Image (cartoon, helix red, strand yellow):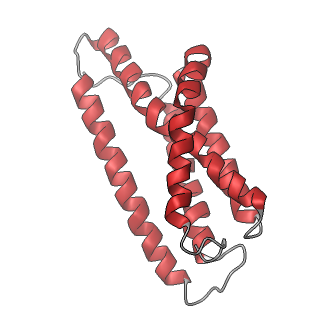
């Protein structure tokens, strides 16, 4: 908040990201129907990671920095809309292969993993932030940039590898 000159404006800034998210949901759905859920989801992850790295490299309090951060709302719509849709496609492919309808199991696993991921990311972020805060004053390795940009990029790199492997459904016979 302080590092990017958002004193007292952080919450409205994040809420504006979600307004952008809601506004782009119809576009996300339209593009996914044309290009495919998997393709748009992977593209969204790549764009978000590149955006986070660019955001981390930008100087604070510059208009381009804020525009880039607000553009993250577009990725949020991709994540919130297409991830459950991809899980549903995955479950439908599993039904076709195994003959067993386990949509509930797949959605439960998705919900559990998304909640655990959010909890782990928040917890790890707070631990890293507290560890770095006394040692680093600012710059590219400031605690805010490490927690807000580099840590999510590392987590997304791991999830991207899992997403790439999931192109073919796994059956639990």
The quarter holding residue 124 reads: bottom left
**Residue 22 visible, this angle:** yes
Rendered location of residue 146, percent (x, y): 59, 69
* Residue at point 72%, 77% (across, down): 139
Instruction: Work out whether 24 lies above or below 1.
Output: above
Question: Whole-percent x and y of residue 114?
Answer: 36, 46
Which quadrant is home to the C terminus?
top left
Q: Is residue 55 left or right of residue 163?
A: right
User: Residue at left 61%, top 77%?
Assistant: 2
Please identify the residue farthest to the bottom as the structure is shown.
Answer: 134
Q: Which residue is at a point 38% across and 28% down the rendered structure image?
A: 87
Q: Residue at x 71, y 73 (%)?
A: 140
- Relative placement, left or right, of 21 versus 170 is right
**Which residue is nearer to you in this view: 148 or 150?**
148
Residue 160 appears anywhere in the view: no
Dividing the picture into quarters, in which one does residue 91 lie? top left
Where is residue 126? Give x, y as percent.
44, 73
- Answer above or below: position of 17 versus 28: below
**Viewer-closest of 91 and 139:** 139
């Amino acid at each position: 908040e302080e590092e990017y000159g958002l004193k007292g404006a952080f919450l409205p800034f994040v809420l504006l990201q979600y307004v952008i998210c809601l506004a782009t949901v119809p576009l996300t759905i339209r593009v996914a129907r044309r290009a495919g859920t998997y393709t748009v989801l992977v593209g969204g992850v790549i764009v978000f990671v590149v955006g986070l790295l660019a955001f981390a490299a930008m100087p604070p309090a510059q208009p381009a920095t804020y525009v880039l951060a607000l553009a993250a709302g577009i990725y949020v719509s991709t994540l919130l809309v297409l991830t459950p849709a991809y899980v549903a496609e995955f479950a439908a492919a599993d039904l076709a292969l195994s003959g067993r309808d386990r949509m509930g199991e797949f959605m439960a696993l998705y919900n559990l993993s998304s909640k655990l991921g959010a909890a782990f990311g928040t917890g790890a972020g707070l631990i890293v932030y507290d560890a770095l805060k006394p040692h680093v004053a600012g710059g590219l390795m400031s605690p805010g940039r490490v927690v807000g940009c580099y840590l999510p990029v590392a987590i997304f790199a791991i999830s991207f590898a899992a997403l790439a492997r999931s192109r073919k459904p796994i059956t639990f016979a």
